[in-house]
Amino acid sequence: MSWQSTLSWENAQQRAKILQQIRQFFVERDVLEVETPSLSQGTVTDVHLEGLTCRYNFLADSPINKSIPLYLQTSPEFHMKRLLASGYGCIFQIAKAFRHEEFGKYHNPEFTLLEWYRINFDHFDLMNEVGELLKTILHCAEPIQKTYQDLFIEYTDLDPLTASRDDLLALISSKNKLSDWLVKEDDNDILLQFIFCEIIEPLIGQSEPCFVYNFPKSQASLAKLCPADNRVAQRFECYYQGVELVNGFNELTNHEVQVQRFQEDNAQRKDLNLQEKGIDQNFISALSHGLPQCSGVALGIDRLIMLALNADHIEQVITFPIANA
């Protein structure tokens, strides 16, 4: 790999212009830009996310001559919610995030996230605002919104909220995508995610951005459950031209429920022989103090810029990918 940047001067100018447009978008809406740490004493418990760690010797309560782990953040979410609990109003951040995942077309282990939180918004309000940002940057058509359940029924004739394991495996087999690890998989949620990723995702959001909402409660993450149907959560994602761009929630504010979800994550980690993660007590303390009603969303800046510039690979929109960082 060359020592030179993979981001051309022309694309660097376009990237800078897009970042300016994003900041102006929030200035016009009176949303404050903030900065939070990349390093933290806590990390996520999510089974599908792995952070990167380093060691540090100099905290006041560190054991003598013994370092403790610090975590590079997979997103600024916990810190930003701590700001909201501290009394901040609507906020946004353009931040570096780090995930221990394979480098590929759409992912570098160090990448740039746009994350923002809107007080007194629900997930529908926030989907509409995300749509306005996408139209501003990408000059795309008006986004559409569909439920996870409706998309499954439309493209597979299966209801994901009632389908059995046998139903899901039969569908995967009918698409010639069945493999040994899927046959052995006894977690329906993994099968649902496989079907969505492999069968549904490539078909949606081609001509206009497609917002998918009301994910199964097993995929709720940090979102509230839907009062009208507690089988689903008030979570959304957005797909456009084959790219997953956005993940957002009507944010869970109950600290007891959040602790329970983290504990369930760790139980699942144990079952999968993955390392259990300590619960971020600063975050839980903030929720206990009180998080206002809000919705929040994370948007992949590098992926957004790829779409804006018609780039084929993430390395074309960042200066030094991991291979030559």
Image: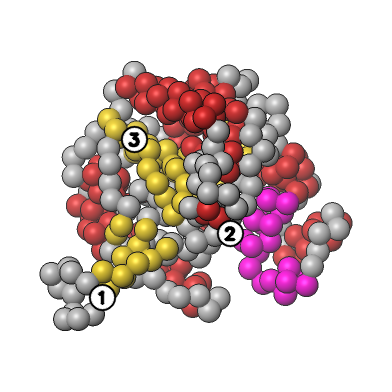
Main secondary structure found in the magenta portion: helix
Give me the residue at 68% from left, 50% from top. Answer: 196
User: Is 297 or 3 nearer to us in this picture?
Assistant: 3
| Residue 205 vertical placement versus 113 (above, below) | above
Give the number of callouts. 3
Which residue is denoted by mark 3 in the rendering?
92
What kind of residue is marked 2? Glu
Which residue is denoted by mark 1 in the rendering?
67
The answer, for residue 216, to whether it is visible in the render is no
Rendering coords of residue 302 (x, y %): 52, 39
Which residue is denoted by mark 2 in the rendering?
102
Q: Which residues are magenta?
A: 180-198
Name of the residue lying farthest toward the left? 60
| Label located before the other in sequence (1 or 3) | 1
| Residue 105 vertical placement versus 7 (above, below) | below
What kind of residue is marked 3? Phe
Cα–Cα span, label 3 and label 2:
27 Å
| Residue 282 vertical placement versus 123 (above, below) | below
| Residue 50 vertical placement versus 276 (above, below) | above
Rendering coords of residue 242 (x, y %): 68, 39
User: Is 131 or 152 nearer to us in this picture?
Assistant: 131
Res. 276 image quadrant? bottom left
The local secondary structure at tag 3 comes to: strand
Res. 204 image quadrant? top right
Seen in the image, is 203 located left or right of residue 296? right
